[in-house]
Each structure stands twice: as structure tokens, then as C-alpha cells.
Image (cartoon, helix red, strand yellow):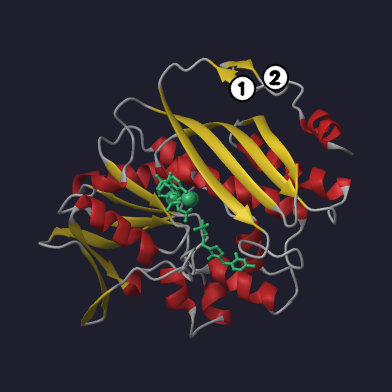
Amino acid sequence: MDEFELIRRISPSYYRQSSVIKGIGDDAFVFRATGDVVFTTDTMVEDVHFSRQTMEPEAIGYRALAANISDLAAMGSDPAFYSVSLVVSPEWTNEEILALYEGMERLGKQHGMDLIGGDTVGGKQLVVSITAHGYIHKGKGRYRSHARPGDLVFVTGTLGDARGGLEQLMQQRSSASPLIARHRYPEPRAHFASGLEPLQRVCLNDVSDGIASEANEIAAVSGVRVTIREQDLPISEVLLQNYPDQAVEWALSGGEDFELLGTIAQEDREALLAIAEHRETPVTFIGTVSSADAPEVILQSGKESKRLLRTGYTHLQERR
Ligand SMILES: Nc1ncnc2c1ncn2[C@@H]1O[C@H](COP(=O)(O)OP(=O)(O)OP(=O)(O)O)[C@@H](O)[C@H]1O
Ligand SMILES: Cc1ncc(C[n+]2csc(CCOP(=O)(O)O)c2C)c(N)n1
Ligand SMILES: [Mg+2]
Ligand SMILES: [Mg+2]
Ligand SMILES: [Mg+2]
């Protein structure tokens, strides 16, 4: 299968989004924009974001798209399109490359998305770079700068499971574990995020690096103090049972959970819970926002409080 045959095999036979004017098969993609359009890009690289020993091709494709949908969700947008730039090494069989796209299609379909283009290059290790597009309702972008003193801090789902799954994968335990499933097949919260439309102001950030990092991003650009109560962090039973000593640390800075961390006005608490229930998304209130001379994140553990620094995964650290 050469690059042209690959393109033929992955081209959709129809488009779900009615705004598509020219899909795969020309020099570029054309669609008719009617509202505010969101663009995001995230890249996954072999031996950085996944290892071939522990991730099947279908899961690599699924997770690469999940990371992008998660960023669309974090802006409050409805996912619409994605394009895929692929660098692939000769070790990959035709079936494996197609399985990568099947993983993306499986998740893309759940969100009504169309594959609208990409690029294919032969190289030394697998790199999957996805650009995803979505729409936001006018004035309803959910920015990191939207936190205000008095807000409640919430998070969806549970935290740290993806890190627990990675640990199990690295120790080559049985792949039937629910933590491994969370690592391989995260559920980006786009359906929940677009359901927040009735709320006037929501601050959102998705959890790719860990909430210690994401909460600091919110504090910095909103110019506020974010206080998080350790005892309220949503940690799954299975993570607590398997990794009692690491669970809290991984909940704070394990990363790759692709949950949403957000803040809302106190008076929107009931409305948020109703939307969460309707969209079958667990939501936990974990803290508060207050005014501060300098932005900071505080972790409250019982009666003790300490600064929560921006720990978590950071690329490009060892550099001249
Ligand atoms: N190499 C780059 N060139 C231009 N802009 C960049 C580059 N890398 C990141 N950005 C921009 O910086 C901002 C933050 O990007 P970042 O990748 O940290 O966010 P994220 O996708 O939410 O996090 P993560 O990559 O951990 O999932 C975004 O506006 C992004 O478009
Ligand atoms: C083989 C392997 N080693 C380590 C990790 C952990 N990891 C890699 S990137 C990242 C942060 C998010 O990345 P980005 O900032 O690019 O979104 C994390 C937690 C993994 N998943 N697989
Ligand atoms: Mg990014
Ligand atoms: Mg993000
Ligand atoms: Mg991201």
C-alpha cells in the first residue's frame, strides 16, 4: 500500500458535516463557515506518548484524536472536522496503519466528526499530528482567563487513572485492567462541554498534563488564587486499591486523563449539576477561586495548606 492507496482506503464515502464543500482528494479542504470556528493541534510521537510494545495501533489513533477533541471540549466547542499528518516507519504493516485510522474513526463517529484531509510521509518513528476544528456558540468560548473570585472549581470524571494504566502497561500486567482501558481509550468530554451552553461564563481547561499544571494555567491567565481540597479529589476505587501510595500524586500530576477542569459562578452550581446528570458526566467540586496579588494554586490537605506548583510532564526540558 503506497501513500495514494492509503488515501484511497481512508477516504470517507460521505461527510457527516453538511458544511463540507471539498473534502479529501484535492490540494486542500474547503468548508463553509457560519459561526465562530475553533482550531487545535496536538501531536503524538512514538516512545514519547506511546510505545509500540504497549499500545495497539487502534488505540494510538483513538487517543491521538481524543487529545484533540479534549482541547475542542476545553474551549466549549462542538467537534466537526479533523485532519491527520502521519509520519510512518517501514515496520508498520498496511493493516496496522489502517487500524490507526479505524481507532480515529471510531471516536470521530461518536462526535459526528469528518476526516477531511492530512499528509503522509515515510520516516523513522511514528508521529501522528492531528488538527481538529469545531464550532462555538457566539460569546460562549470557555477560556482559561474566565475564572473569577468567588467561583467554584470542578472537575469531570476521576483523576490519575491514565497514569495508573501507564504504570501497569510498563510493568506488563494483564491488559484487562480498567486503568489500562482509561489510558488507551480516554473519553474526551465534548458532549458535556457543549451542554454548558446555557451558562453565561465558564472557565475550562482540559487535563493533559495534570491538574497541578492546568490549575496554574487558569490562575495565571485569570489573575486569581485557585484553592484545591485534596480530600475532594475524585480518585477511582481501582486506582486507590492498586496504588494507594501514588494515587494522590498521580491525580494531581499524572496527566493524560483528558477530563475537564473548570470554574463557574456559585449561583450556577445547580445548573451545572443538572447538565452533568443529563449528559451522564460525573462532576466533583474540588475547590474555590479567590482574589490574589499574585496568581497561585493552593492545595489544602486537612488543616495544612501549601503551594501547588506546576508539576507534570514538560517537553523540551533538556536543552542548551
Ligand atoms: N510550536 C508551537 N507553535 C505555535 N503555537 C504553539 C506551539 N505549541 C503550542 N502552541 C500554542 O500554545 C498554547 C498552549 O498550547 P499547549 O500545547 O500547551 O496546550 P494544550 O494542547 O492544552 O496542552 P497539551 O499539549 O499538553 O495537550 C496554544 O494556544 C497552542 O496553540
Ligand atoms: C511511553 C509513554 N511514556 C510516557 C507517557 C506519559 N506522557 C507522555 S506525554 C504526557 C503529557 C501530555 O503530553 P502533551 O503535553 O504532549 O499533550 C505524559 C503524561 C506516555 N503516555 N507514554
Ligand atoms: Mg497542545
Ligand atoms: Mg488543553
Ligand atoms: Mg492538548
189 and 30: which is toward the camera: 30
Identity of the residue drawn at 48% across and 32% down? 78
Give the SS element for disc 2.
loop
**Does the residue tagged 2 have its C-beta within 8 Å of any atom of ligand 1?**
no
Q: According to the image, label 1 marks what residue?
A: 29
Q: Quadrant of the C terminus?
A: bottom left
Against 11, residue 32 (above or below) is above
Label of residue 111 in the image: none
Cβ–Cβ below 8 Å for labels 2 and 1?
Answer: yes
Q: Nearer the viewer, residue 248 or 255?
A: 255
Q: Is residue 305 visible?
A: yes
Image location of residue 99, percent across then percent down:
79, 46
- Secondary structure of the residue carrying tag 1 is loop
State the image quarter where residue 111 is shown.
Answer: top right
Residue 296 figure quarter: bottom left
The amino acid type, in three-letter code, at marker 1 is: Phe
Q: Quadrant of the N terminus?
A: top right
Residue in the foreground of this view, choosing between 64 and 161? 64
Mark 2 to mark 1: distance in Å?
7 Å
**Residue 107 at x, y percent in the picture:** 65, 42
Q: Is residue 70 above or below residue 30?
A: below
Reading the image, the residue beneath label 2 is: 26
User: Residue 182 occupies which quadrant of the picture?
Assistant: bottom right
Residue 285 shows up from this direction: no
Please indicate whether residue 129 sits to the left or right of residue 37 in the image: right
Indicate whether 99 appears above or below 81. below
Total marks placed: 2
Q: Is residue 204 left or right of residue 38?
A: left
